[in-house]
Amino acid sequence: MGPNIGQRVATLLAQSGAAVACVDRDAQTAKECSELAAREGVDTLAIAGDVSSAGALHSLDVAVMAPVFVEDELAGWVGNAIHQVDMGAMSPGRAPLAVDAYQEGINIRGLKLVREGVIDQQIFQLFSDNVRMPRYQNMDLRAQISANLAAGAKLESLIEKYGLDAYRESCEISLDLAEQSARERIRNLPDGHYEREEFLDYDHAYRLRATLDVDGDTLRFDLSGTDPQSRTFINSAEPCTVANMHNILACQLFPDLDVNEGTFRAIDITIPPGTLLSAQFPVPTSGASTLAGWKAQQLALGLISQAVMGSDQEFRAQAQWGWAFTEASWSGRDREQRWFSMKGDSTMHGGGARRHADGIDVANIAGSTNTALPSVESYELRYPVLYRSRGIVPDSEGAGEFRGGFAGEWTRVLYGVGEANDLTCCIGRDYGAAGVEGGNPASVVIERGSDVWEKLADHVPSFDELSGESELLPQQPKALHNSLRNVDVIHVTGMGGGGFGVPTERAREAVLSDVAQGLVSPERAASVYGLD
């Protein structure tokens, strides 16, 4: 496995291009990619970066789709999408200072990558020549092609066993049953109109708005009123916004149902073009899936939580999850003079409290299917860094009868090299996770010129013990090139989840348990939860 340890998703589509079996929010990518491939008659298609026409979530996503033929008839499509570590932008990975899509790396609308079973080396080389880590990224792209070959062979075997007509019929039945079960679930909700707004802080504060009308067996979302698109990387194109909202619906309202494209026949989403949630090319979008896209998730979660209250689905209501984007992006040369680029654990956030349960601690974002963290040792083996700490932040939960999840924190410093380039930012510093009482906002602090190595000679110091010049990093990086030295220590704190219900009504035993584990301080237990 290369450096890409993020999303890896797979999708099976019917002959029509409808997603029959899918995982995570990239089903929308797969659907739109297959439609493009079908129009252009391509064999095996690679799509990356062109979020407006090809359906990628953001410019770092690469989707590879392949048709499956049985006796010269198109039976369906198999595909997968991954988040590549780099696409040759003005800065490694995402491009937080980009002002248009051309600064975010190579834009690929759709290319025929495999011809008659053979990789087109010219196309492959075009990709390789435009990314910063070709050795690893070439392996990732080859793995995507191989995954499709394996999936296609299994689908062919299935059709050989049951017949093409039976397979096609089963696809249509699966889609129809998914729609039927979704509409039955929606009919359990009372008809009503609900409103929600969110804020996103970057170069300034942006407002995002949405409404939801529950109308019989249909949900109608309208994202009108959201601020216009920005000349920064925070924008989300419509496919990314729709995919993120579908993801929340699948996880919050339909987690026990079979979810495929049929499910979303019961969902109507209106997004006026030219806003933060329906950005038009060529505005930048490399932060889409983790910024405005995440906000689309929060809008959906908040609206659904309102809609289920007072129904037999009330247990699905949740406070807001931590959502901040704490990108600690370092790049440079390691001890062997090999170029490296690393990020960090940018999603150590607490889950929102549920109607009758606490939120999940260090849970990633709402709707995530990837809550695992690479081990500290794997980072230290691969990159010239030393971690001083990684753990849970006490008192970071949003208080409530049911508390939000606690946030995580970590501290690291360069090791074995003198300096690197730093492009760190902290988006979400001004807006914590909403709830009856919200979780703490995220933060990124650098202690510049610290005495970390002197302290380490004696013991492992806490971040507060270090002497140096403290700098709270802004939401937007100051410049493209910022020097980081091996005496500069970074401390990243995630965002706690929001609480649900009145804090003083929390069970005494639950408060005592959190205090005993060191998660809640005695002072907070007394002042917030009323523990005497």
Image (tube, rainbow, N blue to C red):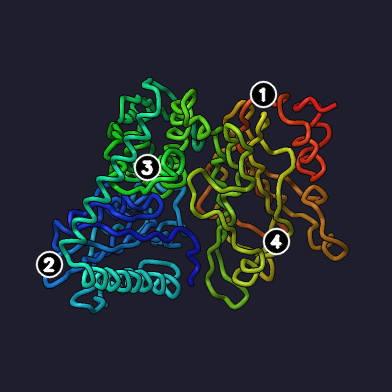
Helix, strand or loop at label 3? It is helix
| Secondary structure of the residue carrying numbered label 2 | strand
Rounded to the nearest angstrom, the CA distance separating label 1 from label 3 is 31 Å
Q: Amino acid at mark 2?
A: Glu
| Mark positioned earlier in the residue sequence (2 or 1) | 2
In the displayed structure, 32 sits above or below 167; it is: above
The mark lying in front, picked from 4 and 2, is 2
The label number, if any, that marks residue 387 in the structure image: 4
Q: Mark 3 against mark 4, which lies toward the viewer?
A: 3
Name the residue: 51% across, 43% down.
Answer: 366
Q: Nearer the viewer, mark 4 or mark 1?
A: 1
The residue type indicated by label 4 comes to: Tyr
Relative to 34, is 410 on the left or the right? right
Farthest right residue?
Answer: 458
Under mark 1, the amino acid is: Val
CA distance separating discs 4 and 1? 38 Å
Residue 446 image position (x, y, % from top left): 68, 49
State the separation of the CA atoms marked 3 and 2.
Answer: 31 Å
114 lies left or right of 471: left
Per the image, the residue denoted by label 2 is 73
Q: Look at the numbered discs 3 and 2 and tell me whether their residues touch, using CB distance below 8 Å.
A: no
Task: Tell which of 281 and 41 is nearer to you.
Answer: 41
